[in-house]
Amino acid sequence: MARVLIVGGYGNAGWRVAEGLLRDSDAELMLAGRNPGRATQLAATLPIDRRGRVSFRRLDATDAQAVAAALDDIDLLIVAAGSTRVCLACARAAISRATDYLDIQFNHAKERVLAELRGQFVAAGVVAVTEGGFHPGVPGAMIRLMASRVPGLARARVSSVIEVDWASLGVLSDSTVSEITDQVADFRMAELADGHWRKSTRRMKVDFGAPFGIRKVVSMDLPELHEVADSLPQLRQVGFYVGGFGPVIDTAVLPLVWMATRIPSERAAAAGGRLLVASLRRFSKPPFGTVLQLDGGLPGGPDRTLMRVGHADAYLLTAEPAVSAAQMILAGPAHPPGLYRQASFVEPVTFFRDIEAAGVNVEIFG
């Protein structure tokens, strides 16, 4: 029986990862963090036959030695919440204990440091999967699946609507606010056009169908798409595009938050994060839900919608792809030791079958 340690296992996404693994596997789980009391409360909501497979541990996940000490008899370490600092400490701990690793946190700085550890993952015999969840984690997998179903696919654009009912989430932890702020600070724009990656600030209109309709989106640079495009040289246009939070937040709040992240002060960044969260609570409006839509076409032909993936709960849509990836890691040995992005690591057919079985809406049109 596999044993899995989940850092942040009682957070909004981490708890759903835990529930998914308890539902779809026979793994034993250890939920780690600074507030095991909250984990105990959540465990009481589980079906009785699953509670015995869950244990808890108080842990400072920024301390690599402390994390390493928690990895006795652990087969997989999942980092479901926390800062870049947490991910890097956990990655180093996984290397020291030869424990496989999965994270669902995206940050360019984290990516660069993990890339520097690539050789150490290989030497330690560790399968490490980064950029899990759906944003990133799913867009590249969508393109891989549709490229296998649509021979000669030359253009592939994955666009997203992410509308969260922020007011219903209760009090967000400092680490969650920090993650949101980091995403603003780390935002970059890029797309593949005519076979070359370039910065792009153009806004496009995408029809997502009911209930979201036509939305404006802008490009967001996802490293996984560079990797997927390299593996599929027939692709000449590739990109990931995101919608905004509405005119007030996009034009007034986000610029202030971005400027706060440029001040060399943790207090300034924290203040920016609190402003953003308060604005999201105030101005976010229904319909709520999350959709990823792949539009593309053949050379010389029109673009059309090829695939759509979505769910009303963005945290569940984050968790279920990670659950599928975790099960593929535990099943081994489909991949040799090394560092992978989730979008390139997973087997697409099984991956989308898994998340659809878990309640995610998966529609294939092409």
Image (tube, grey):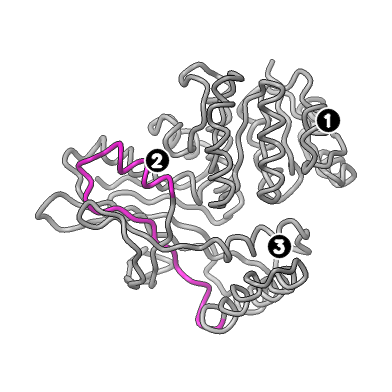
Q: Which residues are magenta?
A: 223-248
**What distance separates the C-alpha of mark 1 from that of mark 2?**
33 Å
Q: Which residue is pictured at 74% across the width and 44% down the height?
A: 8
Q: Position of residue 279 (x, y in %)?
A: 65, 77
CA neighbours of label 3 inside 10 A, class few (<14), some (14 to 19), many (20+): many
Give the mark, 2 or 3, whose residue is nearer the N terminus: 2
Q: Secondary structure at mark 2?
A: helix
Q: Which residue is pictured at 66% across the width and 26% down the height?
A: 95
Query: Does 159 appear above or below 150?
Result: below
Q: Which residue corresponds to mark 1?
A: 55
* Amino acid type of the residue that numbered disc 3 sits on in the rendered structure: Val
**What distance separates the C-alpha of mark 2 from that of mark 3?**
28 Å
Query: Does 114 appear above or below 198?
Result: above
Specify whether 298 is left or right of 365: left
In the rendering, which numbered label is found on residue 44? Answer: none
Give the mark, 1 or 3, whose residue is nearer the N terminus: 1
Q: Position of residue 138 (x, y in %)?
A: 45, 45
In which quadrant will I find the C terminus? top left
Q: Which residue corresponds to mark 2?
A: 141
Specify whether 142 is left or right of 122: left
Q: Secondary structure at mark 1?
A: strand
Q: Which residue corresponds to mark 3?
A: 177
In which quadrant will I find the N terminus? top right
Foreground residue among 310 and 225 = 225
Foreground residue among 91 and 306 = 91
Specify whether 234 is left or right of 161: left
Which mark's residue is nearer the viewer, 1 or 2? Answer: 2
